[in-house]
Image: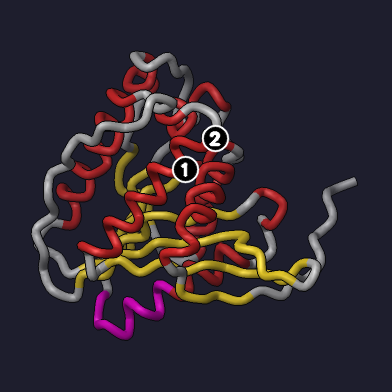
Amino acid sequence: MGSQTPPPLSFKILPATEEDFLTLAQVESICNDTSLGTPLEANITRIMFGPPHPENHKFRAKGLVDQLNKDPTMKNYKAVVEEDGKEKIVAWASWNFYPEVTPIKDWTNLDWPAPANREACNDIIGRMTAMRQKYMSGRRFAFLQVLATLPEYRCRGIGSSLVQHGLAEAEALGISDLWLTASAHGHDLYLKYGFRDLESIFTHEDIAKYGGSGDPKVMAMGRLG
């Protein structure tokens, strides 16, 4: 017998605040570490950060605070359900909206906390930044930087709602070009909303030097107007 369709779920999409950032970091870490469609040994985030770790979560949360304070293009949205009378964050998305042509800066290496593979983190994020520069330089565009859902809340329409929320904001700003990088797990969802494959970002050789093996299946995708 096939798997049963999960029952309908009531949730709200709300702006995320600084008080949410540690929880958002935890949700992102758990989501990425349980990404479907890619073996663990080829999972880019496992190669970069190892399994979910509190030090990585704190570092990520601080980075989100810094971005919020310095980057007015960033908008974070959370998906919230009610459980036992309390609100619970089960998914989130981070978008950047550039209604004016804005230079895409080169990646600046960070001093990642000890649980992470610092060289891998800076190399991999640097490659993704260079790919974005290749395709989006000189454009007014929106960038879906994060889409993360806890495993037990997948396939309930939450990811679609978070994507739709960002697409609506981009349209309101007159932005028709959109960019993201997709894992195998999210690839079909993005195709549904008009994104198309542009270029595979990594090969098995790229991750082998950091102890990974297999095809990482990370795709640059765009919806170019």
Q: Residue at x 34, y 17 (%)?
A: 205
Q: Residue at x 61, y 38 (%)?
A: 34
Give residue 182's position: percent from left, percent from top. 43, 47
Q: Quadrant of residue 157?
A: bottom right
Does the segment drawn in magenta span residue 76?
no
Give residue 50's position: percent from left, percent from top. 49, 27
Q: Quadrant of residue 125?
A: top left
Residue 187 appears in the picture as rendered? no
Q: Secondary structure at mark 2?
A: loop
Q: Quadrant of residue 9?
A: bottom right
Q: Which residues are magenta?
A: 166-175
The three-letter code of the residue at mark 1 reads His
Residue 54 appears in the picture as rendered? yes
Pointer 1 with pointer 2, Cβ within 8 A: yes
- Residue 52 is marked as 2
Give residue 172's position: percent from left, percent from top. 32, 85
Distance of label 1 from label 2 (alpha carbons)? 8 Å
Badge 2 crowding class, 10 Å Cα cut-off, few under 14, some 14 to 19, many 20 or more, is many
> Could you tell whether 2 is left or right of 145 in the image?
right
Q: Is residue 77 above or below residue 40?
A: below
Q: Is residue 133 above or below residue 74?
A: above
Q: Mark 1 sits on what residue?
A: 57
Q: Residue at x 16, y 49 (%)?
A: 133
Main SS type for the magenta part?
Answer: helix
Give residue 12's position: percent from left, percent from top. 61, 76
The three-letter code of the residue at mark 2 reads Pro
> Could you tell whether 148 is left or right of 87 in the image?
left
